[in-house]
Image: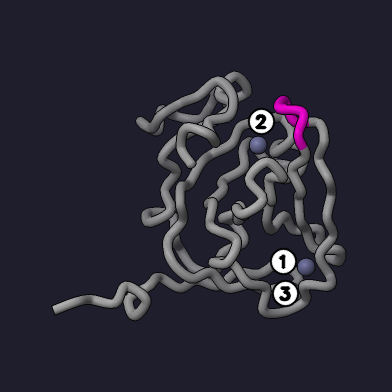
Amino acid sequence: MSTKPVNTEAYHTGSCLCGQISYEITGNPKFCVLCHCVNCKKWTGSGSGWLAFFNKHQVRYTKGEDALKTYADGATDRGSILLRNSCAECSAALTVVPTYHADSVGVMVGSVDGDVSEVWKPKSEVYCKDRPKWLPDLEVKQYDISSYASSA
Ligand SMILES: [Zn+2]
Ligand SMILES: [Zn+2]
């Protein structure tokens, strides 16, 4: 007896704040991470970025893809470009595409509909050199800088 994983695959949707852009995600993330880098702080206006990484084909825009605004973030410590996609209308941070892993897309988990805080709990924290001091120990792997290569 065989089971077809496609039938039981996880399915999620998400959107920007104003709702003109929405997307759907099929399947589970490759990994989930809490990123404390300065660029994520600046981009999100928050203490850290909570990201779930998928293969590109798992994430599909269902509405408003032409309203995406892409910022090519070249100020990464690897010196390679990270594409940061947000809504041109409400500025919500939605996805990132690392040009050094162009088959991957990172979804800003705060834009996902519903509660995924247990299932997409970060398994690691990166750029802990800039970790907020008030954040309690999450008992996950911590890296001073990026761990993409080791966790991908
Ligand atoms: Zn929007
Ligand atoms: Zn970051």
Q: Position of residue 129 (x, y in %)?
A: 59, 19
Magenta stretch: includes residue 78 = yes
Element at label 2: loop
Asked whether residue 61 appears in the rendered view, the answer is: yes
- In the image, the segment drawn in magenta is 76-80
Quarter for ligand 2?
Answer: top right
Q: Amino acid at mark 2?
A: Cys
User: Can you tell which quarter of the image residue 110 is in?
Assistant: bottom right
Viewer-side label of 1, 2: 2
Q: Earlier in the sequence, mark 1 or mark 2?
A: 1
**Residue holding disc 2:** 37
- Residue at the (76%, 48%) spot, across then down: 83
Asked whether residue 132 appears in the rendered view, the answer is: no
The answer to whether mark 2 is within 8 Å of ligand 2 is: yes
Q: Which mark is residue 17?
A: 1
Element at label 3: loop
Along the viewing direction, whichever of 148 and 141 lies nearer the viewer: 148
The answer to whether mark 3 is within 8 Å of ligand 1 is: yes
Along the viewing direction, whichever of 15 and 9 lies nearer the viewer: 9
Dominant secondary-structure state across the stretch colored magenta: loop
- Residue at the (60%, 53%) spot, across then down: 104
